[in-house]
Amino acid sequence: MAGLDDVFGALFSNVDAVVLFGPSGSYYERVTAIDDLDVVVVSTENDVGAETFVELPLEFDEVAERIRFGLEGALEQGIIEGGDELACATSVFSDEIDTVSRVRANANAQTGIYDLFAKSRPEPEVIKAVLELAIELGKKGQKGKPVGALFVVGDAGKVMNKSRPLSYNPFEKSHVHVGDQIVNVMLKEFSRLDGAFVISDAGKIVSAYRYLEPSAEGVDIPKGLGARHMAAGAITRDTNAIAIVLSESDGLVRAFKAGEIILEVDPEAY
Ligand SMILES: Nc1ncnc2c1ncn2[C@@H]1O[C@H](COP(=O)(O)OP(=O)(O)OP(=O)(O)O)[C@@H](O)[C@H]1O
Ligand SMILES: [Mn+2]
């Protein structure tokens, strides 16, 4: 008679590797003691001294995001390959590993989220705060109407040199940071007006209402996207900033880096 092992065993039978998300030292040791098993650790810090390690730049509360991020990082580092079957072990309800997901690595479905967070100049927390703000703004709009917004994050000195004010800067001489609830309300309010927000590597709001004037030479963005997206692409080619754009017309949030769109999310699906 078949037992539960036969049913749940399918979750981890014949996997190419086991991916442990934030394991304790003893858990890691128990798994590495198993013969002929590739073990990958994904965590904010390699405190278990794992040989094969992918660093999470921040905690992802959503399990699907955490796993997607870890696998994109592992693919990027050449630790796993597209098509690999992986048993991803992570904690959902406690501090200990309590969940196993079987996932097939898909090299073609890279969202770019790893590249955006782990390999950009601004701090990961800042990128996350801006991305969440743009998604929230996209979900709700402003007073029920769809809005667009452009956030240029990082390398702020250079971004300021390649832009000019469209109006009085409400953030002049202020020392406020993105992610703060009150600041987010202000940013949403100002998003109805023209131009871009400029945010520093550490998340300080440097300016609103900036008209970006980067060189757009060699910047290729999909047809149908207009001046806001062109400016976003161009400023990230011309500086080490990244740009996060909410489109007023199609409602999508896109992240640009080095002149390219590296992430596209539908706020409604988030
Ligand atoms: N160079 C720029 N710098 C800063 N903001 C800009 C720039 N160009 C356009 N914008 C802003 O983008 C807004 C929308 O412009 P446009 O419709 O051409 O862009 P778009 O890429 O089609 O964006 P959307 O999808 O939101 O319509 C403008 O009203 C302006 O506020
Ligand atoms: Mn438009």
Image (tube, rainbow, N blue to C red):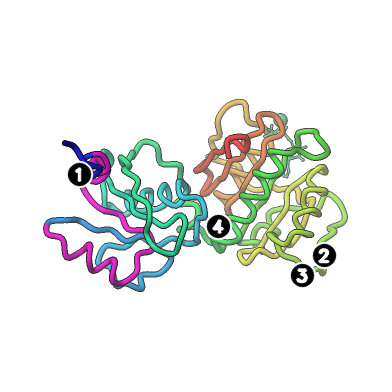
Q: Quadrant of residue 180 in the image?
A: bottom right
Q: Name the residue under label 2.
A: 172
Q: How crowded is mark 4: few (under 14 residues within 10 Å), some or many (20 or more)?
A: some
Identify the amino acid type marked 3: His
Identify the amino acid type marked 4: Asn
Label located before the other in sequence (4 or 1): 1
Q: Name the residue under label 1.
A: 13
Q: Do the residues labelled 3 and 4 touch (CB within 8 Å)?
A: no
Q: Do the residues labelled 2 and 1 touch (CB within 8 Å)?
A: no
Q: Mark 4 points at which residue?
A: 240
Label located before the other in sequence (2 or 1): 1
The magenta segment is 7-35
Relative height, residue 268 to residue 209 (above, below): above
Q: Residue at x 76, y 33 (%)?
A: 146
Q: Which residue lies furthest to the right in this view?
A: 168
**Percent of width and height locating residue 109:** 40, 37
Q: Name the residue under label 3.
A: 175
Residue 78's disc number: none
Q: Which residue lies furthest to the top in this view?
A: 224
